[in-house]
Amino acid sequence: MRYSLSAHCRSVRICEAFQKHLLLFRPSQHQCRKYAARTYERKPTAAPAKKASSTAPSTSLVSPKFSISAKPLPVESRNLSAEEALNPPSSTLPPVLNTPIRTSSIPAYKHYYSLGRAYLTFYKTGFKAIYTNFRLAQSFQQQFADSSSPVGLFSSRRAIQEALFDGTLTRSQYHLFLRVKSDVSRIPLFGLVFCIFGEFTPLIVTVLNPVVPKTLWVPGQWKKARLKAQKRREHLVKDGITGRKGLAQLNEQEVESFDLSDAGDVRRLKGLAQWVGAYPRLWDRVLGGALPVSVVKSRLQKKTRELQVDDFAIERDGGVAHLSVEEMKVACDMRGLDVLDKGEEDIRGNLSRWLEEGRKAGNRTPGRIKAAIAS
């Protein structure tokens, strides 16, 4: 009974400290306004801009340079550089983790204390980034409320894709919405893990990727996930499945044409789905032949649509040349392209070849993209 009571008290203290750190690192409204104004500033017009309505709530995070009730301008007419239109805010990716290096003159207890503080700072910064991204996405949601394609954090993925295709969203805003939705949905489970394991959380997060928000992924998680995906693709190549070129030229209509009664089509369907991580291989190991092939087909169609839309956005908003290195790596992860032990030029070249192959197959035309979103 004494042990249970002490364990309970320890959990309560961890929860209180966890909430305290979140409150200490909440971004101010001024910071969100300043960021939105710097990154998504509209091009000035000849006519004087109208002032925002005085009835607007004082807590709005939208920059004064925006008019909440105004329609968003098409992508090509905004005063944005290609880098700003293509790359989501860096806060949607994990912060830098600065771990101390132990020398012989540093006692073990001091080193581990410093190491714990480094991880605590990393997680606090990551949680701060989630909150900042959420507020920034909310400001865009207010801005687009009266547009032809209203979109928000609780909109469906298809609605967000339609807003991207219509020019309401840039690729940067598109991925901001998707990443915020994903990170916010993972917070409850990760918060429970953090309250249970406390300072030992970094030791177990590498096996809990599905419940950890992406802004809280430590470098070891990224490396392990990419290495696992790379080994999976190597295994598929040995089985005769070559995914890169086939997937770049694949579209939803071709996925729909797979014959689920044909063993060869089913084998290729599962191989292509595993190549881009449309579903985990664990399903095959656990369910075996009981795994419905229709589920695999549906998930591959969804993944193919996402890749078509993202390819369209990259080419429209500036091209691969203006993507940051980290965003190129994330884009390659989505497409099943290797990034481990590769330089920037190799990664950029692989992504460029992917887009070129899809362009030759006609998968990036507006009509094909519109049909894919509507399907």
Image (tube, grey):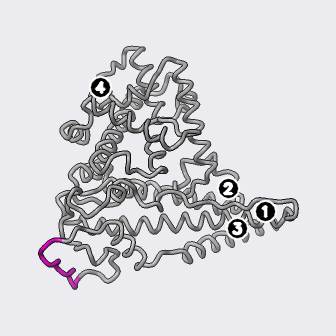
Q: Are marks 2 and 3 in contact (CB under 8 Å)?
A: no
- Picture coordinates of residue 185, whole percent (x, y): 46, 56
Residue 202, disc = 2
Bounds of the magenta segment: 45-55
Residue 117, disc = 3
Q: CA distance from mark 4 to mark 2?
A: 43 Å
User: Which residue is pictured at 29% across the width and 56% down the height?
Assistant: 170
**Relative to 160, 18 lies left or right:** right
Please give the residue where the numbered disc 4 appears in the rendered image. Answer: 254
Whichever of callouts 3 and 4 sits on the residue coming sooner in the sequence is: 3
Whichever of callouts 4 and 2 sits on the residue coming sooner in the sequence is: 2
Q: Are marks 2 and 1 in contact (CB under 8 Å)?
A: no
Q: CA distance from mark 2 to mark 1?
A: 13 Å
Q: Is residue 347 magenta?
A: no
Q: CA distance from mark 3 to mark 4?
A: 52 Å
- Picture coordinates of residue 247, whole percent (x, y): 38, 29
How would you classify the magenta stretch by its main secondary structure?
A: loop
User: Which residue is pictured at 33% across the width and 30% down the height?
Assistant: 357
Residue 154 visible, this orientation: no
Query: How many neighbours does mark 3 have within 10 angstroms: few (below 14), some (14-19), or many (20 or more)?
Result: some
Residue 151, disc = none
Q: How many marks?
A: 4
Query: How many neighbours does mark 4 have within 10 angstroms: few (below 14), some (14-19), or many (20 or more)?
Result: few
Q: Are marks 4 and 2 in contact (CB under 8 Å)?
A: no
Whichever of callouts 3 and 1 sits on the residue coming sooner in the sequence is: 1
- Helix, strand or loop at mark 1: helix
